[in-house]
Image (tube, coloured by chain):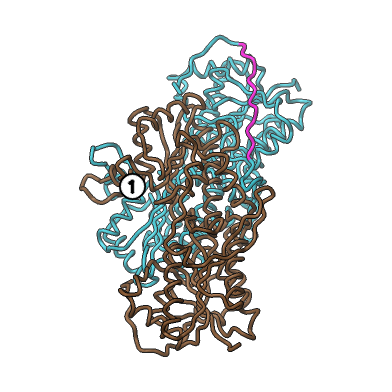
Chain colours: A brown, B cyan
Amino acid sequence: MIKKNVLYAQSGGVTAVINASACGVIETARQHKDVIGKVYAGRNGIIGVLTEDLIDTSKESARAIAALRHTPSGAFGSCRFKLKGLEESRAEYERLIDVFSAHNIGYFFYNGGGDSADTCLKISQLSKSLGYPIQAIHVPKTIDNDLPITDNCPGFGSVAKYVAVSIREAAFDVASMAKTSTKVFVLEVMGRHAGWIAAAGGLATENTGDAPHIILFPEIAFNERQFLARVKQTVDEYGYCVIVVSEGVRDKDGSFLAETDTRDAFGHARLGGVAPVVAQMIQTKHGYKYHWAVADYLQRAARHIASKTDVEQAYAVGKAAVEMALQGKNAMMPTIKRISNKPYKWTIGEARLARVANVEKMMPRHYISKDGFHITQRCRNYLQPLIQGEDYPPFKNGLPQYVKLKNVAVKKKLTHYPSPIVG
Amino acid sequence: MIKKNVLYAQSGGVTAVINASACGVIETARQHKDVIGKVYAGRNGIIGVLTEDLIDTSKESARAIAALRHTPSGAFGSCRFKLKGLEESRAEYERLIDVFSAHNIGYFFYNGGGDSADTCLKISQLSKSLGYPIQAIHVPKTIDNDLPITDNCPGFGSVAKYVAVSIREAAFDVASMAKTSTKVFVLEVMGRHAGWIAAAGGLATENTGDAPHIILFPEIAFNERQFLARVKQTVDEYGYCVIVVSEGVRDKDGSFLAETDTRDAFGHARLGGVAPVVAQMIQTKHGYKYHWAVADYLQRAARHIASKTDVEQAYAVGKAAVEMALQGKNAMMPTIKRISNKPYKWTIGEARLARVANVEKMMPRHYISKDGFHITQRCRNYLQPLIQGEDYPPFKNGLPQYVKLKNVAVKKKLTHYPSPIVG
């Protein structure tokens, strides 16, 4: 086998555990020095590959690479940039192949969601037709949990845990205050298209009456009347009401709630999220004092409360990607296969990228209760194992110690190529 | 010594560790069964005392009481209700004494901030003049860190840790995305009058260039021009900018930023917080893509990332309150006394309530950098020890296990008294 280099790149919104996948890729590659040369990384994802701005990870110590496992977000930089189809963007794909060729890349690992699976597949197709063979393996990552075939997506379990923990804690707070003060608490979570993250909030409910009392899913058209009635019923019964709202909640006409109601006095684009809209709606109707929170990046960066299961799976798919490449596989993605729920057992499987690219896994309707306001037992059975276990990062002076890599650039060999994004 | 009962009540906004103080009070009282009878708690704070709605904590197992140490928020309910002056509210004070007398209360422990210190003092004064002696001890608690004399306030250290951890994690996220997407992240934190919590975000900065790059304090009049210039300078230098903004930030005329700009199209009271206002301001001027988060209750309920120092101090002031009462002290508050910074050493001191009530400890100007955008080394020296150590709660099924007490009511002995708050 001829010794080839690896190119690894991170894509799209980062997660608490995408670096654990990077760690899996790099540590596994370093164990195969007989067949793998260096591991390069694209600086800021595929943009770094296009512009030949590569990082030489061999300059990082074993300790620094090991620390990636407990460091959130994208250590090499990620990017929001989707390559278009082969016809439209042929020049860009050809440039990628040129960069691969110039740096003796034999293995390309692209760590991302649906878009990057598509890019990864196209690269593998084009490299074949251009006569520069690349083994392109996609490493799954997305907090949205919307990749098909795999049981779940690394990154999701940790957001799920953050949301479930946060809603439980905030609910204890509201319950303490409800008698004379705040009666309603609204937490806004991510998930523009699918309610997986909102659903995870439902895990905090273990007994009847436990928060959250209401979950608003993007899958269920928002019905203001029914919602407000349920809020009142909950406050009447338990004294307070805790709500998880997905940023993607829409009304029956398909408009985002957050977009319709939050223009400011000057007509500026929305300032607020959907949480204040929902909270205000309740106050107007029922007069309850409210508080609301928008977790935003905190939810996907919260490595301090990451799911151990998620960290292990993120590492495992990185490791598996390298092993699959060494087995000669191409245009594939390692997947997580669930073997059993109780106890939770899983293994690594694999899927052809042709079956992954451009397929979005939605939340099944039977995961949402009939009234549309909570999750079902089946949903709970699915979600519960994904938040299992804690995997605390090391702390110093009261703060988590995350690694910042040196990210030494690889010497360029090609002519300048302008970045397709002005950053 | 005649055996008397204890009455404990929680007041004001709850914290991640106020129950640790409750635990300290109850466990210590249980160790002195020769002189202390039962420990009662006011249901929903002083409201429960006024309405004779008391909880018998002797019905709780030792294990349940021990679990209070790792359970956030107010296990007996708190309340937002301030008794007015003795003249205005004499009837209410007299009712309190009636309740104390009916239930053989000899020791009153009031766990709260400045307002409850004032109430506690007045109760002790009145009980003397009415001839029913009560030993009233105030147990300090407030995330605002604004009580005088004590080195810090239990509850603050855990919020401080949450904010510092969160801003560090979010900063890693933004740094990953900044090349092609989000360049600015704004985290809104609590602190309407003082910047202690915002300042704590500054602990995340350990090296030049580390986030947060800008902190907006209530103590510093907001200067839009200087602020926007600093944001641009930061993005130019580091590629991104992370900002902590206190909810209490005001412009030079003293108006809250959050109030001035966020009326919705219908002129409704503010929907959003100050974070979206600041973020929008930046986008309008510089065009940077932004994200913002409002932590709200999550920050003060986040027991999962509580400061070990804070938990220990919260427990210690509860314990000390009981010991002080048994030493015959009255109208006092246990304080935290700092002995040294490195290593951090502290002990329990005490303060007369007359010196605590109605005195607000502000953040010294020399804790804020000259330019008004960050903390100084002196501030860091003060804050750093308060976030030291982790004290994770037990987890089961991926979630923290917090205790819900039975909260069995004590049989009423007096005539009905209407609640001064319609809840």
Q: Main secondary structure of the magenta part?
A: loop
Residue placed farthest to the right in the image? Answer: B34
B127 falls in the magenta region: no
Residue B369: quadrant of the picture = bottom left
Residue B23 position within the rendered picture, expressed as x and y whole percent measured from the top left: 67, 36
Can residue B407 be found in the magenta stretch? yes
Of the pair B406 and A329, the residue shown nearer to us = A329
Which residue range is magenta in the image? B402-413
The chain that hosts pointer 1 is: A
Q: Secondary structure at mark 1?
A: loop
Q: Quadrant of the N terminus of chain A?
A: bottom right
Task: Say what amino acid the circle numbered 1 marks.
Answer: Gly
- Is residue B147 visible to us here? no
Residue hosting label 1: A272
Front in this rendered view, residue A371 or B322 = A371
The picture places residue A371, in percent across and down from the top left corner, at 45, 33
Quarter of the picture holding the C terminus of chain A: bottom left
Task: Work out whether residue A188 or residue B238 is closer to the camera in this orientation and state it.
Answer: A188
Q: Position of residue A404 (x, y in %)?
A: 52, 71
Q: Quick check: B19 above or below B172?
A: above
- Residue shown at 46% from the left, 57% from the top: B367
- Asked which quadrant contains residue B17, the reply is top right
